[in-house]
Each structure stands twice: as C-alpha cells, then as structure tokens.
Amino acid sequence: MATIHPGTGEPVGTTARERSGAPVSARLGPSAVASVDRSHGEPAGRSITVAVIGATGYAGGEAVRILARHPNVRIVGLVGRGRDHESIASVHPHLATTGLEIDQETPDGEAVFLALPHGAAAGLVPDLVARGSTIIDLGPDFRLRDPADYPRWYHFDHGATDLLAEAVYGLPELHRVELSGLADASTRIVGTPGCYPTATLLALAPLARAGLIADLVVDAKSGVSGAGREAKAEMLFSEVNENVKAYGVNGHRHVAEMEQELAWLSPAPGANPGAAAVDFVPHLIPMTRGILSACHVRPTRAVGQAELDALYADAYKEEPFVRVVASAPSTKHVLGSNRANVFVRHDARTNRILAIGVIDNLVKGAAGQAVQAFNLVHGLPETAGLDTLPLAP
Ligand SMILES: NC(=O)c1ccc[n+]([C@@H]2O[C@H](COP(=O)([O-])OP(=O)(O)OC[C@H]3O[C@@H](n4cnc5c(N)ncnc54)[C@H](OP(=O)(O)O)[C@@H]3O)[C@@H](O)[C@H]2O)c1
C-alpha cells in the first residue's frame, strides 16, 4: 500500500517533502481521531507470531523485553549473527526467564522486527515481504520517502527503493490512520522513527500544523544507550562520565526525518519557513536512557500562551502515550515506559516559543513505539503490551 498524503490524496513519492497538508489527525480533528477503530474486531485471544532480527543489540533486546509480555504475541524466533541455539541469557541476562534462544536463521513470522545498523535491513526486507511478513524496522532504512536521502544522509544506496513508497512512517500520533490501513495491504512495512525525531516531532507537531514555525533551533540531549551496544572508544565510561559533548553538528542524520515530517505537517508549502532546514544540535550526556529535545521557535505571528495551551491540548487529548505537562519535563518522568511528555511555553519577553519533548529512547524512541505501530497494523488495541508505568527514581 502506498502512503497516501492526507492533504493531497496522492500517493507519497520522492517529492513528498515538498508537498503540504496537515496529517489526518489534524484534518479530521480530535473527535475523528477518537473514532478511529483501533481494534479491527480481532479476537481478543489471538496470538501473532513474531521474530526479532538483531535481538542481541539494545533496541532488539528491548523489543524482546516488551514482546515477551505482550498478550497477543508469540515469539517464534530471535536472530543474531553467528548464533546457534544460544540462550538469550548469554547476551541479555535480564531476559533469562523468557527461556528464549538466539539463532542465525530467520523463521517465518507474521511480523518481523528488525533492529539493525542502517543499510542492513534494506537488504533483508524484500525477501521477508515476499514471505508475507509485516515488517517493523527500527532502523532508518524505511523512514525516508526520497531514495536520494539515503546516499545523502546515510552514505549508502538503498537497494529496495520500490518498497520505500509502500512504507509508513511509524509515528502513530502522526500516521495512525495509515498504520491501521496497512492491515489490508499486501505489503506492510513500518519505518519506526528515530529517537531524536520522535521527541522533537511530538514537541513541534501542534506548532507545525498551525504554521507557527518561522525559525527553529532544536537542542537535544541523549543518554548513551542511544548509540547502541557496539563497543566504541568514545562511549567508554571514562569518556562519557562527568562530560557533556555536542556531536553531529551541521548534519546529524535525524535531520532528514525531522524535515520530511515537518513538511508533511505543514498546512501549506512554506507555512513553516523555519522547518525547511532544521538547525539541530544533539548532545551526549552521562546517563543510560532518555532523550530531551528542547525546540526554540520564533513564531510566524503574534501568539500567546492560551493559544498554545489550546493547540497542544487539542492535539494530544486522545493520545494514550503523550501527556502535555505544565512544568519543564524530565526524562525520569517517562523512564522505562512508552510515554512522551510534552511542554510548551511562550516567552513574551523574547517572543520565542520553547517546546520540549522527553522520551525513553529505547521505548517510545524505538521498541515501544515499534510495538505501538505493530498493534495498529495488526488491529490490536494500540496499548497492548505497553501499559507500563515509568520507573523511578
Ligand atoms: N539505541 C537506540 O536508542 C535506538 C533508538 C531508535 C532506533 N535505533 C536504531 O535501531 C537499530 C539498532 O540499534 P541498537 O542501538 O540496538 O544497536 P546495537 O545495540 O549496536 O545492536 C545492533 C544489532 O545489529 C546486529 N548487527 C550489527 N551489524 C550487523 C550486520 N552488518 N548485519 C546484521 N546484523 C548486524 C548486532 O548483532 P551482533 O550482536 O552480531 O553485533 C546487533 O544485534 C539502529 O538502526 C538504530 O539506529 C536505536
């Protein structure tokens, strides 16, 4: 199924970034969002067979942790390079009681989650699609609609460009109707968003829909698990501890998704001039999990706090995982959960809007969001397997 743009009604192709139009949820209004059938009449006890490729990594391990407790999932296989009936306890001791094993071969599953470095999923997905599986890719290989974005931002040529037009960007708060629509499609591919774009887009979506972004700086912080489990010298404790550093300056890869989706949200071409070239500065900070994205916005017109409060309340009042909070949010408030907290303030003195989003990068920023999208594609309750409270302290 091609992704249909809600504004134009056209299939989204390589020029999607140039197209305008609010997301379906914005167009239809909150009452229409509430009326979206999220259950599809599936029998409550149905089990869907699921495999996870890249189960040895952080995102893959988190997917296993969530899926192992999902009431409608039966894990039929975990895949890791060079593994042969290896107990999951040897790579993820916290998952020992699942009794699962990791193998090299990919079993047939109704759904396959992939948590691999960029470029690796694109090579595997055509075969998995041919087998009839739903693809839930946690990496970037199916997030970007324009094939030219892969060599530009990720320095590889995408080998399955024909499938890009079939994929849906898996941020349910923006693309719920399309994700649910995949249920009836013969090709079902979800490109689960990156962690920084998730926090940033949830913080900015109401402003983008209202055409309020004249100028934008996104200043974000991430814990070190965002960089994955593979050993890297700059991720050593002695390098990260008691340190804060900016990285990816002038072109972090996640900018591509931010610009793509902010253009999608825009009510008309050029309505958000500040979103056309996102100025994004990520920082690595000494914590394990969490992302905080602080978005500094110069508005396109005069705006006040009451209008912003109404925009955000309207955008998120039906959302099961997004909460608009009244004081500056903290990553600890969402730790270990699929929740996102969003905050917005207008500063009348500087005439800037500060919009902040916080998430757990491995849950709402990766595996939890992937399961949320999987639930929609398979007609399950959207919150199935995800109704966990955050962890504290
Ligand atoms: N970490 C996050 O917070 C986060 C958030 C959102 C999205 N993601 C995305 O999720 C994907 C996985 O990230 P991660 O953080 O889980 O990384 P990771 O901890 O380094 O895990 C990478 C996984 O991929 C496997 N792998 C590595 N190179 C491979 C190759 N050439 N072919 C096949 N398998 C290979 C690894 O297996 P071995 O055990 O054999 O090395 C491991 O299972 C990435 O695309 C990342 O961008 C991550």
Image (tube, rainbow, N blue to C red):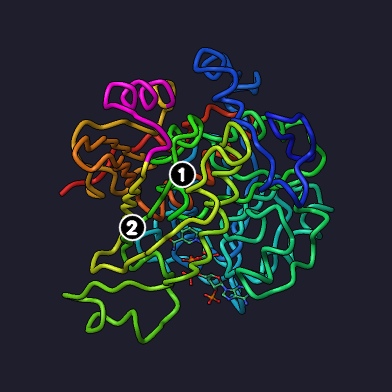
Which label number is shown at residue 201?
1
Residue at horizontal 32 percent and vertical 37 percent from the top: 342
* Label 1 Cα crowd, 10 Å radius (few <14 / some 14-19 / many 20+): many
Query: Along the horizontal axis of the image, is 34 left or right of 226?
Result: right
- Labels in figure, total: 2
Residue 349, image x, y percentages: 19, 39
Q: What's the amino acid at mark 1? A: Leu
Mark 1 or mark 2: whose residue is earlier in sequence: 1
Residue at horizontal 21 percent and vertical 35 percent from the top: 348
Residue 385, image x, y percentages: 46, 37
Q: Is residue 304 magenta?
A: yes
Tag 2 residue: 219
Q: Identify which residue, 60 or 159, lies in the foreground.
A: 159
Q: What's the amino acid at mark 2? A: Asp
Q: Which of the 4 image quadrants contains residue 105?
A: bottom right
Which residues make up the magenta segment?
A: 299-315
Secondary structure of the residue carrying numbered label 2: strand
Q: Nearer the viewer, mark 1 or mark 2?
A: 2
Residue at horizontal 59 percent and vertical 30 percent from the top: 22
Query: Along the horizontal axis of the image, is 358 left or right of 53?
Result: left
Q: Identify which residue, 342 or 96, lies in the foreground.
A: 342
